[in-house]
Amino acid sequence: MYDKLKAIAVSGGATAFGTGMVEDLRVHFDALPPDQTEGMSYGIVIGARVSAAVLKGCITGPTRHYLHHYRMLNWLLDQTAAKIAIAIQNEGYNALPVPASQIIDWQAQTAHLSHKMTALRAGIGWIGRNNLLVHPEYGSKIRLATILTDMPMETDSPVENDCGECRKCIDICPASAIRESHREWNKAACLEKLKYFAKAHNVGQYICGLCVKVCSPR
């Protein structure tokens, strides 16, 4: 099923695909009742590449163009995740597609689960200094969605890499929230800047795009 599901992902527009064991993460799925994910030890992660051309327009903060693109990628991922979940169910297993971007608590900035953590397990990339997932080719220019399932899956290996000497995200961060290690990322400072951008840039959503724009591992 690995190749079949990957083919569905690619045909749906995904540019990244991976699977991993996520049983140890289930206790962190705060908005998903334990019985809803019971037995779902595997996570299938799909990613869609963000347009570098769209991000070029983000000079001092997010733009309406970036907001639209951001939402369209989330929609594409949700549609593709639904197709993958249906294919799994047709094989007699359970599957739970988790929305690409649905915030449960805006103040805490938490969702049903952390896609970047499931993506870490699925070998999609590593956690960068900007506290976002970094894909080996696309950098942080990638949106993610997860499908949880109890179907036994071939799993991918974690990416053995890091940001090395690159500090572009530190230099561009308008909130000075990014530090040497992602564990030192200043969430409060980042959130305050996102709140400001939501109003000042007329986007109405907590997005920025600046550290995403400059993140280029290659």
Image (cartoon, rainbow, N blue to C red):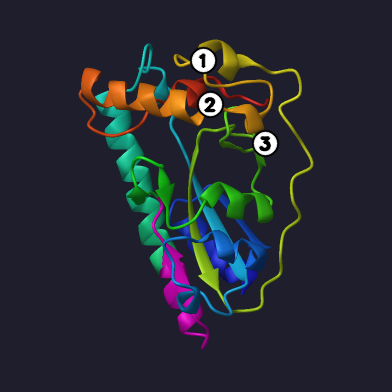
Say which element carries label 3: loop
Tell me the mark number nearer the camera, choosing from 3 and 2: 2
Counting residues from the start of the chain, the first of labels 3 and 1 encountered is 3
Q: Is residue 144 above or below residue 174?
A: below
Q: CA distance from mark 3 to mark 2?
A: 24 Å
User: Where residue 147 sits: x, y (%)?
Assistant: 50, 65
In this picture, residue 165 sits left or right of residue 138: right
Q: Quadrant of residue 185?
A: top right
User: Where residue 59 sits: x, y (%)?
Assistant: 38, 12
Q: Is residue 209 above or below residue 38?
A: above
Provide the residue designation for mark 3: 136
User: Where residue 64 sits: x, y (%)?
Assistant: 24, 26
Packing grade of label 2 (10 A; few <14, some 14-19, many >=20) is: some
Q: Which mark is residue 89?
A: none
Counting residues from the start of the chain, the first of labels 1 and 2 encountered is 1
Q: CA distance from mark 3 to mark 1?
A: 24 Å
Nearer to the camera, 71 or 172: 172
Tell me what residue is drawn at x 50 percent, y 61 percent.
29
Packing grade of label 3 (10 A; few <14, some 14-19, many >=20) is: some
